[in-house]
Amino acid sequence: MGNILDCSTAEPVQPEPTIQDGPPDTTEVPMLEDKVPLMESKIWTYLRDYYKRNNAVFNANPETPTFISNSSYIASSYANVIIKFVNDWFKTPSCDKSKPIYIVEVGAGQGRLGFLILKKLMSMKQYFPEGVKLPFVYVITDFTSESILKMKSHKWYADFVSQGVVDFAVVDCEDIPSITLEVSNVHLTAETITNPLFVIANYVLSSLRNDAIRVENNALQRGLLSVSSPQDNVDVLNIIPRLQFTWNFVDMPETVYNDYDEDVKTLIQEYKTTIPNGTVLLPVVALRMLRQLLALSNNRLVFLSGDVGTRVLAKLSASRNPYITTHGSFSMPANLHALDCFVKARGGTVFASPYLEGFINSVYVMGINPALLTTTRWMIHHEFSTFTPESFNVTQKCLKEESSPSPSVAAVIAVLRLAHFDTDVFMRFKQVLIERGGYAGSAPSTRKDILYDLDAVRTQYYPIKSTADVCFELARIHMGIKEYDKAISLFADSNENCADHHVTWHNMGMCYEYKNDIENAKRCYMKSLDIKPSYRESKLKLSKLATEMKSDSSATPKPVSS
């Protein structure tokens, strides 16, 4: 439970990725499949099953690292690029002002990034293009109907649905002939899309099906994967971290080469002539997805990606076996060089981050003259070539790990503002604000600023992990600075989002008691005891109120630690 006080100081743990390149030892383990082409391996079935089951369950504490790809910082970066493109496009003579630009997020998972992007976009409503009734519709998509159903009915999206700025669709990145919107019942095809299609693929490319080849002295070999696991009968949701991989490479028959589509064949020939010796991943499904999206958009496509990968051929074609990184699910480095080649071959423009390490953002523009996108180009440069999402991720991580014994309140507030009030950043540094805030006696202007910051954190909250009870921690801070009404409201939000807890009700009772609202205080203490009859603190409070109906409202209450 995220709202248990004695657990609140524990930081969320992100499992360290592990790279498995061959069997870890000589112990014999059950073989799940032997020497199968990577494209045809059952690991892709395991991955789809993992996401199907995990994305459909909110508050399930997903293991896959998501901070950098789902933070308020990166959402703000993407929203800034989107709003610039929307304004640029609706100034062109080719625009259709009677129809919106569809912003399609593929592989949206549990929908947090889309929620944060929409929050940012709607905060910039005053900058929407003039004379356009509905400039965009943000389309949340996933390949599982279960997760789309969950998000479509999620109360966090209700306001956006009523404003007509969000829709939902089941979209499988392995095959996108068209898109049917769930709310408006609009069928997006090449005939119905009259403005460019803007697609977001965030931490998606590295999870799409690849094939693997090796070039050895001008000869082509195909990668065959053997998969084993010490437990071959465990639930597929848990089997991925236990998988062990062994690679073999065999000569590629001409019939196999001929089965690839023309884009992949072109890549293979380029790699055969430019790579003396090395192994490379072929993003077969990613290229097919781009090709289908381009057809769907009438050859006017903007494709914004963020992922772990490389576009440097020398790094791409390593001599070692391909990486398979496991972290709850698994991923493989995205071959951005292949996507660059695809776009350039069609006369498109590649806007690539100049940085080569970490989480890399790219924007591909096809069928649109870049000269028409003046402010878009500037914003892409600003967001992805200066202080990038990867740079912010490193900054907040270093502040946490390198400050001894802990960062100052001023530093925490500064990084929280830089984070666009991201809730994960707040949870990482919450203890500094709880223990060393001391805002009750601050100057009025300082207090007002801090309350503004805390309210801003609340607007970014999208409940996924029950262990990250943001409202409870915000309530603790408000309680400490005597903002009792706000604390009560936040404690109530905590109960609603992360289930009733006896400590939450007890702290609500304390807030009412310090407001001298004795009846409500007693009601909350009794509710705490309904949940946990043995809870000593609530028993003592009720006993005290029974004999002493007056409380010192000027004292600052200390939240109880269970």
Image (tube, grey):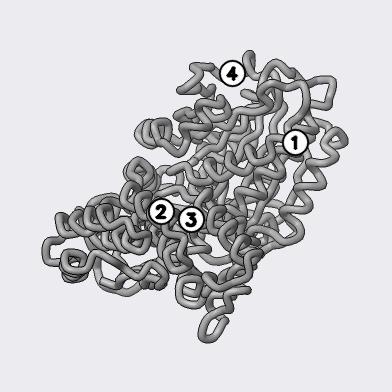
Q: Nearer the viewer, mark 2 or mark 1?
A: 2
24 vs 98, nearest the viewer: 98
Residue 544 appears left or right of 38: left
Estimate the spatial distance between the alpha carbons at disc 3 and disc 1, rounded to whole Å: 30 Å
Q: Find the distance from the CA under tag 2 to the CA under tag 3.
A: 25 Å
Q: Is residue 283 visible?
A: yes
Contact between marks 3 and 1 (CB within 8 A): the answer is no
**Which residue type carries mark 1?**
Tyr
Q: Secondary structure at mark 3?
A: loop
Q: CA distance from mark 4 to mark 2?
A: 44 Å
Q: Residue 522: x and y, percent? A: 22, 57
Q: Which mark is residue 127?
A: 1
How far apart in space, not on screen, are marks 1 and 4 (Cα)? 29 Å
Q: Which residue is mark 2?
A: 490
Residue where numbered disc 3 is placed:
66
Using the image, tell me which numbered label, if any, was put on residue 469.
none
Local crowd size for mark 2, using a 10 Å CA cut-off: few (<14), some (14–19), many (≥20): many
Is 403 on the left-hand or right-hand side of 370? left
Question: Which residue is located at x 25 percent, y 71 percent?
Answer: 562
Residue 208 appears at what percent x and percent y? 50, 44
Tell me the number on the disc at residue 189: 4
Above/below status of 315 relative to 130? below
In the rendered view, tell whether residue 283 sits above or below residue 487. above
Which residue is at the front of the view, 243 or 525?
Answer: 525
What amino acid type is highlighted by mark number 2? Leu
Q: Are marks 1 and 4 in contact (CB under 8 Å)?
A: no
Q: Earlier in the sequence, mark 2 or mark 1?
A: 1
